[in-house]
Amino acid sequence: MKWSNISQLAICTMTGWVTLQSFQPSAQAIVINNMAGAQTAQLLGAPFTSVTEIFIGGSLCSGALINQFHVVTAQHCIFGEDASNITVRFRDSDPINSLIEAISVANIFEKDATNDLLDGTDVAILELSSPSPDFITPLRFLTNADDLVGSTATTVGFGLNGVGSVGHQGTRDGLRWAAENVIDLFHGAGFQGGFSSIYTRDDDTASLGGIILPGTSNIFSTDFDDGTAENNTLSDFGSSAIPVMNEGTTAPGDSGSPLLVNFNDEWLIAGVLSGGTTATSEFGDISWWTGTEEHRLFIEQRGGQFVSTPEPSSIFALMTVGAIGGISWVRRRQHNS
């Protein structure tokens, strides 16, 4: 879990809320590898204006605009909250991510109000009280997302940030950071059932090196590699220890942010961030993402759109190279495939 022992930092379960008291000025949402550094993360994150800050009273999560009136986020961010206590902030793509507009929330929609981060239901939709800025393009959702293991994806958020050797250190700079990672694992009922026997115990959890892993629960997993076997946390499941160029992980305040893959030059949502395994988001951290395809009807009822993609047998050949900020994102096979 991503808890913190910093005195002024209050973090809700997993990668959830961060109190505003913890936002100290910092040159350092995302934690990226040391070689890429903060500037790369900021440049990668700047174009994603559809990724939003969500303020819940004095706490912070992230989200993604899915049409002019709706934002998808994590259920645990807003569970038990009144809509009148929530504000969504839209920021520009300039170097300082200038605030464009802050919009209050009119309604909260939850399909399964379990407030369980790892049961595959950690998805909620916020209805804005007024339309989002016209020039911000909403994000759509990916179908056949269960075939994404081995794909390179982007993670974008407004949470705490830093570099992998030391983690986030309880600070953020207020900018939208992004990094890349390889989707190492997907497991859930009706999807890659072969993993269920590895993960599932009587209590529907399993342990890997002392880390409690979710059971059969519609969860994507990524680990934060630095090239060492020690930090290749998901090696037992075919993860390669070799990091991608802009390898990074998530941090507190990124909860609800989208897991994005590029298909035919369009960034599509495959999941929303539910949590992770370390307090500081250092190398070896695992991030957990709730898959969105399982909630297709719920999302479509609120105006979200899914993009029809090829069946899993042919999607590998058609996952094209996309580019944003000069960085290419390509599908990569598992190390053991």
Image: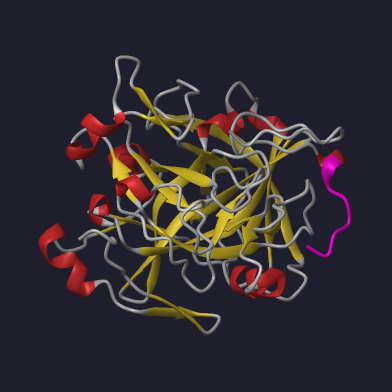
**Residue 23 within the magenta-colored segment of the rendering:** yes
In percent of the image, x 17 and y 39: which residue is there? 194
Quadrant containing the N terminus in the rendered view: top right
In percent of the image, x 16 and y 63: which residue is there? 310
- Specify whether 68 is left or right of 254: left
Instruction: Give the dominant element type of the magenta stretch: helix, strand or loop.
Output: loop
Residue 174: where, in percent of width, then height?
77, 58
Q: Quadrant of residue 10?
A: top right
The residue furthest top is 202
In percent of the image, x 86 and y 35: which residue is there? 8
The residue furthest front is 229
Residue 277: where, in percent of width, then height?
55, 38
Which color mode does the image show? Answer: secondary structure
Nearer to the camera, 108 or 210: 210
Above or below, 62 relative to 32: above
Above or below, 270 relative to 299: below
- Specify whether 305 is left or right of 109: left
Q: Quadrant of residue 269?
A: bottom left
> Which residues fall within the magenta stretch?
22-28
Q: Quadrant of residue 289?
A: top left
